[in-house]
Amino acid sequence: MTLVLIIDVLAIGLLFATTLTKGFERTLPVAAFLMMLFPMESQIPLPGLFDLTTQRLIVIALIVLYIFFGGAPGKIGQNKKLPLKLLVLALMAWMLLSAANSVVLSVSLKSTLSQFLDFFVTYYIFVKTVSKAETISRILLAFVAAMFICSIFGAVEAYRGWSVISLFPRHFHRFAYLAGEMDRGVRTQSTFGHPILFGATLAMAIPMALFLVTMAKTTARKAFLWSAILLMFLNIYKTSSRGPWLALIFSLVLLFLLDKNQMRRYLTVITLLMITILVVRPGIWGTIRNLYMVTLDPDTAQGESYQWRYALYHITFLHLNGDFGRAMWGYGPESFFFLGWEGDFQGQTVKYESCDSSVAALMAETGYVGFAIVAVLLLKVAFVTFRGFRRMPSPANSLCLVLFVNICAFCFMMTNVAILGWGQQNYLLWILIAIAVVYPTLALPETISPETRLSSDVLFSQRRAEVFRS
């Protein structure tokens, strides 16, 4: 507990000191770094209330700082309409309706309030505060720096068997993974709740680091970013998680096919390096191949894990389709673990006490309507980023492409693990959503030369005069 108190004091002190010396907007990258770095075990239990995690203290500090130091007028990004406002409000309203009809009312109400304070408020503050494209670059660098440190912890965990989470008081959450207790041996999880969550976040951080390399102007920063990329590749392999591997492969393939800037050249170098490693160390390829082969065998633990995801959809559809009300608003946020559903799985009757899919959990807990709202919100963000990539000039559009593949990777991982609605990775998601909706507005003025802007103004004036004459 002493360690947690020290971390909390240092984190809050750093946020206030940064705001007082550099301004509130410069505090956002610091907050993003801290949110990603600390585990959910860094918390102070408040019996009967919320667990006061370090991340929640950071959000509370951001609220206070935003009230007193944020919202300075006269900046791009300030005093503007809130993007995605209707979808966010619809999601909040539907979660409240679902909670009101929950089978565990108090749990669902706490979960809904937690979603609002932890993530929606974070999204609001970042959207309303970010006024420069430079701030976005700093936020991405903060994420990569946090994942670099987490990867150092992960490397120590993989080769020395010591986990940084062992320094914190033990707290059981929806995974409660214990290193070495899984059939795949020791799997690195660093400061995350499970190796697959760590791997999923790495699959999103590596494309960010590649983008930042293309923007780096100093040798020192390029060296740091390449070191981070190589270390993150090592760690995602050591998680032994199939979903994050696929998410990273899909992301890098999309970047290679769509990006016409330096990232394609860097990806070619990385591909050649990976092929060389697989040739020199054939055991690595054997490990990857064997893991995917046993996934196809339902009699293995990995095969059962894969089949379990399909069983989750089956049992969810079975219960929702038999009750119109539950099909609409579900059983209440965070209620899946209290439902006590039983059903057939590989010829045996089992209890469904875990939900390794955010998609199935969304449908079960908030109904088809709640799932549809979240799906529309994420699709909207994906559309905005892809449209920005197609319409913005190069190289400014590369960030839109990176954000697009990150959102796609997160959506893919939602089918593999309970990744939505909690943990460090969800702070990452909502901050990325905030960046995605503000970046096109901030970047376009910076990509237009004064001559082009002047020509556009003259053309607009001429067309307006023609309209008035007609």
Image (cartoon, rainbow, N blue to C red):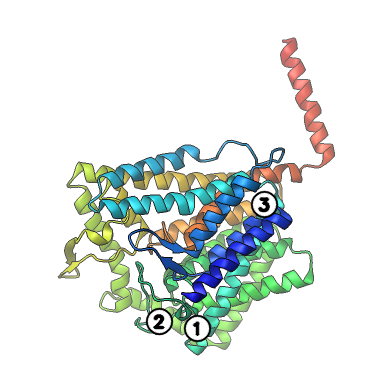
Q: Secondary structure at mark 3?
A: loop
Query: Label 1 sits on what residue type?
Result: Glu
Q: Position of residue 454 (x, y in %)?
A: 82, 33
Q: CA distance from mark 1 to mark 3?
A: 35 Å
* Circle 2 residues within 10 Å: few <14, some 14–19, many ≥20: some
Q: Which residue is mark 3?
A: 25
Q: Quadrant of the C terminus?
A: top right
| Sequence-first disc among 1 and 3 | 3
The residue drawn where x is 78% and y is 71% is 219
Which of 443 and 338 lies nearest the eye of the viewer? 338
Q: Secondary structure at mark 1?
A: helix
The residue drawn where x is 50% and y is 61% is 55
Marking on residue 380: none
Q: Position of residue 225 (x, y in %)?
A: 68, 70
Q: Is residue 364 depicted above or below 208 in this figure?
A: above
Q: Which residue is mark 1?
A: 157
Q: Quadrant of residue 17?
A: bottom right
Q: Position of residue 281 (x, y in %)?
A: 54, 87
Which of 275 and 352 lies nearest the eye of the viewer? 352
Query: Label 3 sits on what residue type?
Result: Glu
Q: Which residue is mark 2?
A: 179
Q: CA distance from mark 2 to mark 3?
A: 39 Å
